[in-house]
């Protein structure tokens, strides 16, 4: 029995020993000499803006935020013609170059952030005025006029200059220009603000004329048209001196400008104090007898748009010495007796007109055109006329030379009737007469010449005539 107990005790001790060994074996492990590395934190980069709009020439700032890295962001622009970028650490300055779009990228390692930048065009500085042109008069209510000036995207001071301050002077107050007419004529006002400028043409016409807005028929036949336009005539108090007709005039009723295209019939008849005449640029028609008997009228300047000079329109204008056609003259009609004088009148004896040109545009060259123009010496007919009508040069006693186109086929009776002299030895004497004909001698011989044209038809009379053919003007 004792042996059994002893054996049991020994067995129990061994079991306890085994358990202790097992517990020791299950205790803390020895540290691993090569542990696995901890995972690194992920790097990130962001921008404080994902979109931006900037005006050409200006800048915008972008700030990059970088996490888990000490590296600085690297910035770049995808379209440097639109905008460029410069960096200072993680802050970038984007400079707008020209209208367009670009992407500004901030990069750290392989990480990027992008901002879309839209560049808008820089607003253009501009200047504008509320008058395309000015029509003024050298007296009365239209002697002054105002121009309102508008500036955009500019803070420059406004100034104004007159190309001819003998015609118009100017004064500037803030955004307003005040123009004052000094004399008739044309000039240009230049309104400025820094490098910006705007021009305003100015026309100063004679004060005191009467302008009537009406419907006027222009042209003939199928080409005729009716236009709303002004007809002008002398004022209730007759004007004097130099007369300048406006090209346009303002209608208070219609609140708009309309062209001045016609001088009324007898509009200035027998005005004894007008000394000169300048037609407005829009003038088309000079009415019948418009300036008949204007005894002091010495010079006339026409315009390129003039089409018609009416019958007897400058008749008995004894002082008229200069009739100047515009360079691009388009006149087609010269009326009957347009530059004639009453037979054997004091006006005829005092006549001053010595030379005259018939423009190439003329298609209607009527009878009695220069009758009794006793001082007329030379006439050049550029117009391709076919006929010189009755009494055209009747008693033009001082006429010594005439140039005639090759298109001529007929000279009516008394077209050169009564010619009785030449200025060679004084008016009324027997002198010489020269015909410059643009055609050949055969063409001249084919011209039908009416009666009472001895000076130009043959040399059987007392007046020697010289014919020059194929003449150049």
Image: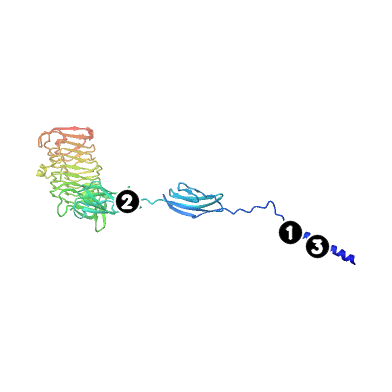
User: Compared with residue 292, is residue 433 higher up or lower down, i.e. above or below?
Assistant: above
- The residues bearing labels 1 and 2 have C-alpha atoms spaced at a distance of 92 Å
CB under 8 Å between discs 1 and 2? no
Element marked by disc 3: helix
- Select label 1 or label 2 by which is in front: 1
- The residues bearing labels 1 and 3 have C-alpha atoms spaced at a distance of 17 Å
- The residues bearing labels 3 and 2 have C-alpha atoms spaced at a distance of 108 Å
Question: Which quadrant does the N terminus fall into?
Answer: bottom right
Let me know if residue 461 appears in the view.
no
Element marked by disc 2: loop
- Select label 3 or label 2 by which is in front: 3
Element marked by disc 1: loop
Question: Which quadrant does the C terminus fall into?
Answer: top left
- At 20% from the left edge and 34% from the top edge, which residue is drawn? 436
- Specify which label sits upstream in the sequence, 3 or 2: 3
- x%, y% of residue 458? 15, 34
Q: Which residue is mark 3?
A: 16
Please, which colouring scheme is shown?
rainbow
The one of 180 and 264 positioned closer to us in this rendering: 180
- x%, y% of residue 164? 23, 46
Left or right of 207: which side holds 346?
A: left
- Specify which label sits upstream in the sequence, 1 or 3: 3
Q: Which residue is mark 1?
A: 27
- Specify which label sits upstream in the sequence, 1 or 2: 1
Q: Which residue is mark 2?
A: 156
The one of 392 and 112 positioned closer to us in this rendering: 112
CB under 8 Å between discs 3 and 2? no
Other-residue count near label 1 (Cα within 10 Å), few / some / many at <14 / 14–19 / ≥20: few
The quadrant holding residue 255 is bottom left
């Amino acid at each position: 029995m004792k042996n059994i107990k002893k054996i049991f005790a020994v067995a129990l001790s061994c079991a306890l020993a085994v358990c202790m060994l097992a517990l020791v074996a299950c205790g803390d492990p020895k540290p691993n000499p090569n542990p696995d590395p901890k995972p690194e934190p992920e790097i990130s980069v962001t921008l404080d803006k994902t979109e931006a709009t900037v005006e050409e020439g200006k800048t915008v700032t972008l700030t990059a935020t970088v996490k888990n890295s000490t590296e600085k962001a690297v910035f770049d622009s995808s379209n440097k013609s639109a905008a460029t970028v410069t960096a200072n650490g993680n802050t970038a300055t984007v400079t707008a170059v020209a209208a367009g779009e670009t992407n500004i990228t901030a990069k750290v390692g392989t990480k990027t952030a992008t901002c879309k930048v839209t560049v808008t065009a820089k607003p253009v500085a501009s200047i504008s005025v509320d008058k395309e042109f000015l029509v003024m008069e050298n007296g009365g209510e239209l002697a002054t006029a105002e121009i309102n000036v508008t500036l955009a995207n500019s803070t420059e001071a406004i100034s104004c200059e007159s190309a001819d301050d003998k015609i118009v002077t100017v004064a500037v107050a803030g955004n307003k220009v005040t123009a004052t007419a000094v004399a008739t004529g044309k000039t240009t006002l230049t309104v400025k603000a820094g490098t910006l400028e705007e021009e305003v043409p100015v026309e100063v016409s004679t004060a005191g004329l009467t302008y009537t807005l009406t419907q006027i028929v222009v042209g003939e036949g199928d080409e005729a048209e009716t236009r709303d336009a002004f007809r002008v005539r002398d004022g209730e108090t007759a004007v004097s001196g130099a007369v300048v007709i406006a090209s346009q005039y303002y209608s208070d009723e219609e609140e708009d400008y309309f062209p001045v295209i016609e001088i009324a019939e007898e509009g200035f008849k027998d005005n004894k104090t007008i000394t000169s005449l300048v037609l407005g640029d829009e003038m088309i028609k000079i009415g019948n007898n418009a300036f008949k008997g204007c005894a002091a009228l010495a010079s006339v300047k026409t315009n390129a748009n003039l089409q018609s000079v009416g019958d007897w329109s400058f008749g008995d204008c004894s002082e008229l010495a200069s009739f100047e056609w515009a360079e691009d003259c388009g006149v087609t009609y010269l009326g009957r007796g347009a530059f004639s004088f009453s037979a054997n009148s004091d006006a005829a004896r005092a006549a001053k007109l010595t030379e005259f040109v018939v423009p190439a545009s003329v298609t209607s060259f009527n009878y009695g055109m220069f009758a009794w123009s006793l001082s007329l010496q030379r006439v050049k007919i550029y117009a391709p006329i076919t006929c010189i009508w009755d009494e055209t040069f009747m008693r033009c006693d001082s006429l010594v030379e005439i140039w005639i186109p090759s298109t001529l086929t007929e000279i009516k009776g008394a077209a050169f009737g009564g010619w009785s002299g030449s200025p060679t030895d004084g008016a009324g004497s027997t002198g010489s007469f020269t015909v410059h004909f643009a055609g050949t001698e055969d063409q001249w011989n084919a011209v039908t010449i009416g009666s009472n044209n001895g000076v130009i038809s043959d040399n059987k009379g007392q007046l020697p005539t010289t014919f020059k053919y194929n003449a150049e003007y």
